[in-house]
Image (spheres, rainbow, N blue to C red):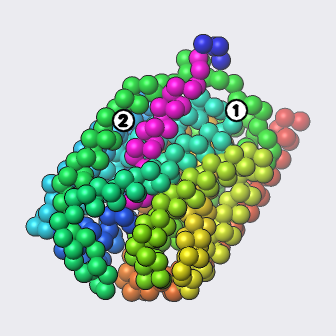
Amino acid sequence: MNKKESPVVPVIASLVVMLCVGIIYLWSVFRSPIQATFGMQTGAVTMVSSVMLFGFVFGTLIGGFVNDKKGPRFAALCGVILFALGVGLTGLLNENNSRLIYLTYCIMGGLGSGFAYSACLSCIQKWLPHRRGFASGIACAAFGLSTVIFAPVSNSLMNAHKVGTAVVGSTETILVDFRAVFFTMAIIFAVIGLIACALIRLPKTQPAAAAPQAAAAPAASVPSLRLGQALRTGFFWCLFFDMFLINGTWNLCTPIIKTLGVERGLTPAMAIFAVSFTGIANALGRLAVGALSDKMGRTNAIILMAVLTILGAVGMTFIGGPAYIVVVAIIAFAYGGPAPLHAAMTTDFFGPKHFGLNYGCIMLALGLSSLFFNWISTSFLHSNPTPTFVMGAITAVVPIILMLLIKRMEKKRDAAAAQSQA
């Protein structure tokens, strides 16, 4: 790399954008006040986070294509504008048009978040190819830390613009002037995000990657594969279904962290803290496991996260009080850990050139997972925590099998490569 080319500014700028667009995980904070203020039904308000997540993964797919063609600065800029616009327009809603929240907050906000996420993740990987797991980890950690920063900010804004109280179910919650709340947040995201986007750029010459480690990455001779080529490999579908299943427990958990916490004996303040603490655990999982995978291997790290997910899901069936926060944090850590691993493995198996589109397609599994698991929980399990999280524990076993299958495919691939070289 040219000595004058420092990764510091573009990497930090990418991380700032990640912080701005990471409020996809904040719905648990908004859920009860919005339900009370807009008079939404429980089923409708539960699906908001799932629809936004689905918008997010479509954003990573479309944004990945834009990133591959136009570069990360343009893709991130489009994402920040669309995201801030979606959040701002949500402030115009009321009880008469509350269903439009699926268009503004979910689709527009989710798509914008996905655009920026894909662009910034790709940019950071290209600046730090010698530590791909760490690069993916810090990018995903910044995305997860958004909850830590903006959960108390959002709660303070809602309390500052409180207009009354109402009872939702058996819990009293506040009525809020959301126009002021979402307008303020949209301005914050737009100003900070647009300034950061101006500083995002790719290195003029691609830094040399370190020699791949057997435990962390495939053979260096693996060429960059286009999406059509990647789709014909077993690696792609193992990653796709791993993402679909290992994230099921978190997708079931995230819309109800606050409300279930209150039902399990937490005060409203402690429940808000639980939401913020999941952001810390989520970010720690992304950062620590991403860096650790460069040493212990991606598949081993995902197996470990699947085991933690199973333990957390079982705990969610009965644990209450302060221990509830610990259980939710375990689930958040286990959800955060695979995020950089899937990104790094996409580059490991299919190369960096078409990362945006390849990873965006794999990310569709995350949106499908959110819709599927919450639909099963709502429609068939009646949102009962016990059978819901038993389902989460059972489905988390399959990723262990998928990782063992990837190990087997890696051995066959490496043996074939060695034989061809001989």
Dividing the picture into quadrants, the one containing residue 73 is top left
> Which-is-in-front pick, marks 1 and 2?
2
Measuring 34% from the left and 32% from the top, which residue is drawn there? 194
Q: Is residue 207 left or right of residue 259?
A: right
| Quadrant of the rendered image containing residue 262 | bottom left
Contact between labelled residues 2 and 1, with CB atoms less than 8 Å apart: no
> Residue, x 17% and y 65% (percent of image)?
163
Which residue carries the number 1 mark? 130
Under circle 1, the secondary element is helix
How far apart marks 1 and 2 lie (CA) works out to 29 Å
Is-magenta flag for residue 23?
yes
Kindly identify the amino acid type of the residue bearing the numbered disc 2. Answer: Ile
Examine the rendered structure and indicate whether residue 407 appears above or below residue 20.
below
Q: Residues within 10 Å of mark 2 (few under 14, many from 20)?
A: some
Q: Nearer the viewer, residue 6 or 153?
A: 153
Labels 1 and 2: the sequence-earlier one: 1
Lateral position of residue 129 relative to residue 73, left or right: right
Point out the residue furthest to the right here: 422
Q: Secondary structure at mark 2?
A: helix
Task: Using the image as rendered, state which of residue 173 and residue 378 is in the foreground.
Answer: 173
The total number of labels drawn is 2
Q: Quadrant of the N terminus?
A: top right
Most distant residue in the left direction? 96
Q: Is residue 262 visible?
A: yes
Region rendered in magenta: 5-27
Q: Nearer the viewer, residue 43 or 403?
A: 43
Mark 1: amino acid: His
- Specify the label residue 192 is tagged with: 2
Q: Position of residue 275 (x, y in %)?
A: 46, 64
